[in-house]
Image (cartoon, grey):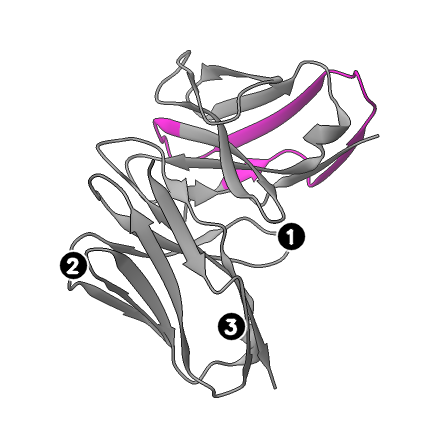
Amino acid sequence: DVKVTQSSRYLVKRTGEKVFLECVQDMDHENMFWYRQDPGLGLRLIYFSYDVKMKEKGDIPEGYSVSREKKERFSLILESASTNQTSMYLCASATTSPLHFGNGTRLTVT
Amino acid sequence: EDQVTQSPEALRLQEGESSSLNCSYTVSGLRGLFWYRQDPGKGPEFLFTLYSAGEEKEKERLKATLTKKESFLHITAPKPEDSATYLCAVRISGNTPLVFGKGTRLSVIA
C-alpha cells in the first residue's frame, strides 16, 4: 500500500513565523502535490512537482513556497504565516493516477 | 473555465435508503474522473476512476457511472459507516493536476 506521511497532524504557529510542512512518500512517485482544504471552498492546489528540484504553481501559490530536494520528500513553506493560512493542508503523490493522500496537517496561525 | 460541481452539498439518509450523488463537469477534454471518500480529520481515500461515457465501477454498496457531462455515485442500502464526504475530481489532459469539486457530505442515520 502507498504511504504518504505528513510529519504533523496538528500545528499551532504565530503570525509572522516561518512554517515548514513536510511530506514523505514511500512509492517512488514522480509527482507530488500540496493542497489546502477549507469549508465551503473544497480542495485548492497550492504547488506541485513532477520531478526532483522541479516545482509548478497551482491555483493559490501566494504566500507559499516549496522544496523538493529528494524524490520522496516535498516540503511546503509558509514564509511568514498569516491568520488566513489557518487551514487543513493535504499532501498527495502519484505516478500518473490516482492521487494518494496523506492524512493532513491542521495548521492554526494565531 | 473548467468546472466541477457536486450536488447536493449535504445529504442525510436513513439506513437502507438508497440515493445518488451527482458530479457534473464542464471541461474541454476529460482524461479521467475520480471519486474519493474522505472521513473527518483524514485525507481523501481513492474509490474509483472512470474514463469513458458508459463506464461503470462497483465496490460494495457503491456504484459509479459516467456520462459525457456528469457522473453519479449510487449508494445502495447505505449503512452508518458510509457516512463521509465524497469528492469528485477530473483530469483534463495528460499529467495535469486534478480539479476537485467541493464534495457532498453524506450522513447515514441508523
Q: Quickly name the residue at label 3.
A: B82
Position of residue B34 measured from the top left corner of the image (x, y, whole percent): 33, 52
Real-space Cα distance between discs 3 and 2? 26 Å
Badge 1 element: loop
* Mark 1 closeness class: few <14, some 14–19, many ≥20 residues within 10 Å: few
Tell me which residue sits at (19%, 52%) in the image: B51
First along the sequence among labels 2 and 1? 1
Residue A100: within the magenta?
no
Q: In this view, does A91 lie above or below B4?
A: above
Q: Quickly name the residue at label 2.
A: B53
Front-most of B28 and A93?
A: B28
First to last magenta residue range: A4-31
Q: What residue type is labelled 1?
A: Gly
> Quick one: quadrant of the C terminus of chain A?
top right
Tell me which residue sits at (36%, 31%) in the image: A29
Q: Quadrant of residue A26?
A: top left
Q: Tell us which disc is closer to us: 3 or 2.
A: 2
Give the residue at the far front of this rendering: B1
